[in-house]
Image (cartoon, rainbow, N blue to C red):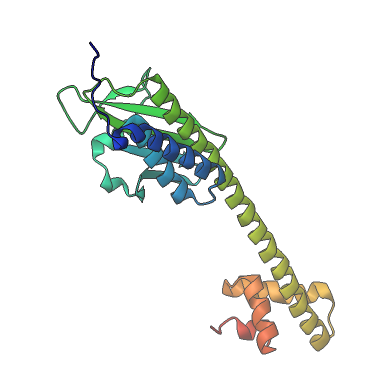
Amino acid sequence: MSVLRPAITANDDDRPLDTAVRITSAARQLVRSEDLEEALAVAASAIGEALAGEAVLRVTATQHDLLASASGVVPPSALSPAVREVLSGPLETGGTTADPRAGDGARGILLESSGIHATCRAWAGVGRSPGPGTAQRTVAELLLHSLAQAVDRIVTVDRFRQNEANLERAVESHRLVGQAMGILIERHRIVSEEAFHVLRRASQDHNVKLREVAQRVIETGAEPDDVVGRP
């Protein structure tokens, strides 16, 4: 006598495959992401899906201390004090914690991964069920590691762009000061050191940046002491 197996709908059968596809897509997005908020939202969504819970992230770097969910960066007030405490507290062996949002033995999983510049934590409540298996946790850990690498890359690129912008401003300031000095040298028949001293004195006496003094001299043709009071 044959045994009839329970019917499985197409949707039920496809669900694990759909989840795997979405997680793989998220991992690829993290590898190419150039936007920090987008990376956090993608990682939170994928990690939550891997752990079968709602994931919340905390990312700390030199200039950042951010909390995020699948919807993106969230203010601290959007999370309960208990959840914030879990994300800031010690990492227990195995990463299993009590779920601060629920009682009756509900549990959560806390994971951590660090890069060169960033430390990333992910917490997800998994209820009272046995929770995700080793494979699911490994996927979540790999996603969190990918996030840490993405944050490192984004922070490095941002620093490079900031340094590049600072260099461009320095070069432009040098050009403006040199041009203003040329105006003063030609007008007063003085040497370059004297012209620079005039500009610097006006800058210091009136607490106006040297670059700004030079730019006003160029634009108005007036003397440095006369232009510092103008808007």
Seen in the picture, residue 229 relative to 84 is either above or below; the reply is: below
Between 203 and 12, the one lying in front of the other is 12
Q: Residue at x 61, y 56 (%)?
A: 162
Residue furthest out toward the front: 1
Q: Position of residue 93 (x, y in %)?
A: 38, 17
* Residue 92: quadrant of the picture: top left
Which quadrant is the N terminus positioned in? top left
Q: Residue at x 37, y 32 (%)?
A: 16
* Residue 212: quadrant of the picture: bottom right
Between 135 and 180, the one lying in front of the other is 135
Q: Could you tell me how many numbered marks the image carries?
A: 0
Q: Position of residue 35 (x, y in %)?
A: 50, 52
Q: Is residue 65 visible?
A: no
Between 203 and 29, the one lying in front of the other is 29
Seen in the picture, residue 227 relative to 101 is either above or below; the reply is: below
Between 123 and 60, the one lying in front of the other is 123
Q: Residue at x 64, y 61 (%)?
A: 165
Q: Position of residue 223 (x, y in %)?
A: 68, 86
In this picture, residue 31 sits left or right of residue 188: left
Seen in the picture, residue 188 relative to 133 is either above or below; the reply is: below
In this picture, residue 231 sits left or right of residue 190: left
Q: Position of residue 34 (x, y in %)?
A: 54, 50
